[in-house]
DNA sequence: CTGAAAGCGCTTACAG
DNA sequence: CTGAAAGCGCTTACAG
């Protein structure tokens, strides 16, 4: 049996209430009492029972973290998520908050997600990646503060932290254009909101430098390496290819490069490629991939800060925060 | 204010105790009462207050997960950990357990780790990777069940789940030997227990096939790519190199390969290499790395199962469980 | 089968 | 500055 506040009270011959106040170093308790209590607490190895504290305070000191199913797969999406998690962990830990994880099992009305949402078990919720809309709706009715991370959500009334995809697409495309490639294509993705952002940045660069928009040069993969591999092969077969590609994820960019190489073309000599994410080992893939580095841990950190303020009812910033990415030049863009 | 058990009681004109029992579908409550209560609960949107349940049950339904500092760095260690986490999450979720994370901030006596350990906030603890010994000692005195994962801990009285490193080293070395390489070196690591395991498997293969042991061919890196890069360059400079290497991690294996290539040697023609881990993108590094695949998510799953049994006081298996890895053949071993 | 009561460990008005 | 008491939301012997 762990020591309780009562044990300390009995030990010192004072009341439990006073012990509690002393432990909180309340100004309404004498210095001597505080000291006596602290000594006794140490001696008796007292540790507060958080559960009891939670019950009376109504605060759980838990943050729910909802991940999309994807994280279970062994892909770079997973790594991406795990880095966001690190950022979250860092800040949450500093503020004495615990994290409760749950997977969005798409509609399955049970499991940890359900528990977290409905059982008063969290003070706020962080949602990573795409999660079904009805979960967000459920959350909204529950009144629990929610912050979306990397969620490419259209509704601007949600609190969200994202990579500035538009800007990322813009700098990548611009980089390729200023390198002198006469035509730049974009390999986008079937995820609509995300695609739209990238497209907007891509178009801005094209317009700014007076390049013609060739609709065929804008394709959409599903997110997998295979999808862009096939798309690339198809374009090659049709003999209609830009001199450079901005691809919206590194994994898809590797698919493009493989498609090119397997058709006997070389990168960047025949076609240049720039990806986005900056997943690990890119220095060692062949050829090393130039990409747009997303500051994912920073996204996590920012989101927790926002959520904590929201929980305390003192967030006054913008609903949507976009973190600026940065170009990382390696070999596939052809820059010397 | 959320609905409580009292609200339901008042609404139905029965006592809170009966409501509680009905909600648990106790056999000692009439079928009609159970039905009435369930309907009322639904109608009033009742959700149990987990905190209160915890206070009375004494069970937190939380599992503490302690990670080493490493996870904050953007390396494959991190990915490795994140995959273990997936395995953990999967099983914990299925059993309605939450996860509480903490970073081992090496001796810093505060933060989430401290909270988790001392505040009755978890029913059991999972420790991933190397954690300082005194934390394990603290845990042991607390009486909370602990399972180590990927911890390469010497003390066989601890509960632990690990990769079978000895076996991994054995199959890798054996593979290289049967491919016909006359000498096989091992690039080990400064982490002692881990190194010893690998060495034992490596030696077993050498002995079994009657290969001579050349002490200079057994080196130790720190874990980083750079460390093995330098070691390899040094061996080349000394003009004393085996025809093949088993390297205990993929990241270090890539360091070896870079060292070889930067010295004008080719892989696997001049020197073959086999790594261990099977981190992502290995198909696309140059040349694609043959490796020993570790089933890391499985390690996580196994560990949670063990911990849950331990918590319930009904674990009767072995203290140490080793998960068997598998050889994944790509290009660097030179197998056709 | 059901109710009244005590209790889990803590906090916090309310008196004094 | 301190004590006695009520209460957070639930569970569970104990009676009946």
Image: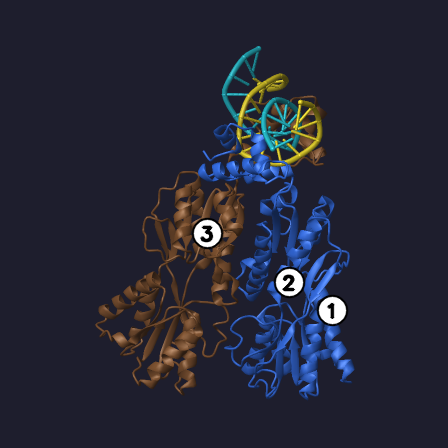
Chain colours: A blue, B brown, C yellow, D cyan
Residue B78 % position (x, y):
50, 63
The chain under label 3 reads B
Which element carries disc 1, helix, strand or loop? helix
User: Could you say which disc has been placed on residue A318 in the image?
Assistant: none
**Pointer 3: what residue?**
B301
Read off the chain for label 1.
A
Chain label for disc 2? A
Asked if marks 3 and 2 touch (Cβ < 8 Å), the reply is no
| Vertical side of B240 occupied by A115: above or below | above
Residue A96 appearing in the image:
yes
* Rendering coords of residue B184 (x, y %): 30, 75
CA neighbours of label 3 inside 10 A, class few (<14), some (14 to 19), many (20+): many
For residue A330, above or below residue B203: below
**Residue name at image x 62 percent, y 60 percent:** A300
List the residue tagged with mark 1. Answer: A196
Q: Alpha carbon of mark 1 to alpha carbon of mark 2: how far? A: 20 Å
Q: Tag 2, which secondary structure?
A: helix
Total marks shown come to 3
Whether residue A109 can be seen here: no
Q: Residues within 10 Å of mark 2 (few under 14, many from 20)?
A: many
| Residue A332 percent across, percent down from the top left | 58, 82
Horizontally, residue A244 falls left or right of residue B120, namely right
Q: Are marks 3 and 2 on the same chain?
A: no
| Image quadrant in which the C terminus of chain A is located | bottom right
> Considering only vertical position in the picture, is A117 above or below A258?
above
User: Where does label 2 land, which residue?
Assistant: A299
Give the answer, above or below, for where B178 lies relative to A236: above
């Amino acid at each position: 049996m762990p020591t309780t506040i009562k044990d300390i009270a009995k030990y010192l011959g004072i009341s439990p209430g006073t012990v509690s106040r002393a432990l909180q170093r309340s100004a309404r308790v004498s210095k001597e009492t505080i000291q006596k209590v602290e000594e006794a607490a140490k001696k008796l190895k007292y540790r507060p029972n958080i559960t009891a504290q939670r019950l009376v305070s109504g605060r759980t000191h838990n943050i729910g973290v909802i991940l999309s199913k994807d994280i279970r797969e062994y892909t770079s999406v997973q790594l991406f998520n795990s880095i966001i998690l690190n950022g979250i962990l860092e800040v949450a830990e500093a503020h004495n908050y615990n994290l409760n994880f749950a997977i969005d099992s798409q509609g399955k009305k049970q499991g940890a997600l359900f528990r977290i949402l409905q059982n008063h078990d969290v003070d706020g919720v962080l949602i990573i990646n795409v999660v079904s809309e009805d979960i967000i709706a459920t959350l909204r009715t529950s009144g629990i503060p929610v912050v979306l991370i990397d969620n490419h959500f259209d509704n601007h009334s949600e609190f969200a932290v994202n990579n500035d995809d538009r800007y990322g697409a813009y700098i990548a495309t611009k980089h390729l254009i200023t390198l002198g490639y006469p035509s730049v294509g974009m390999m986008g993705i079937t995820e609509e909101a995300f695609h739209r952002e990238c497209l907007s940045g891509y178009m801005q660069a094209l317009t700014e430098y007076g390049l013609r928009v060739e609709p065929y040069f804008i394709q959409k993969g599903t997110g997998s390496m295979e999808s862009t591999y096939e798309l690339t092969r198809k374009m090659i077969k049709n003999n209609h290819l830009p001199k450079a590609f901005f691809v919206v994820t590194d994994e898809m960019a590797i698919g493009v490069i493989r498609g090119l190489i397997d058709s006997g073309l070389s990168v960047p000599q025949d076609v240049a490629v720039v990806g986005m994410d900056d997943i690990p080992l890119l220095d060692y893939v062949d050829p090393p991939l130039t990409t747009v580095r997303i500051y994912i841990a920073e996204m996590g950190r920012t989101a927790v800060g926002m959520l904590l303020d929201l929980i305390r009812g003192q967030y006054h910033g913008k609903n949507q925060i976009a973190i600026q990415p940065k170009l990382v030049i390696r070999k596939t863009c052809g820059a010397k």
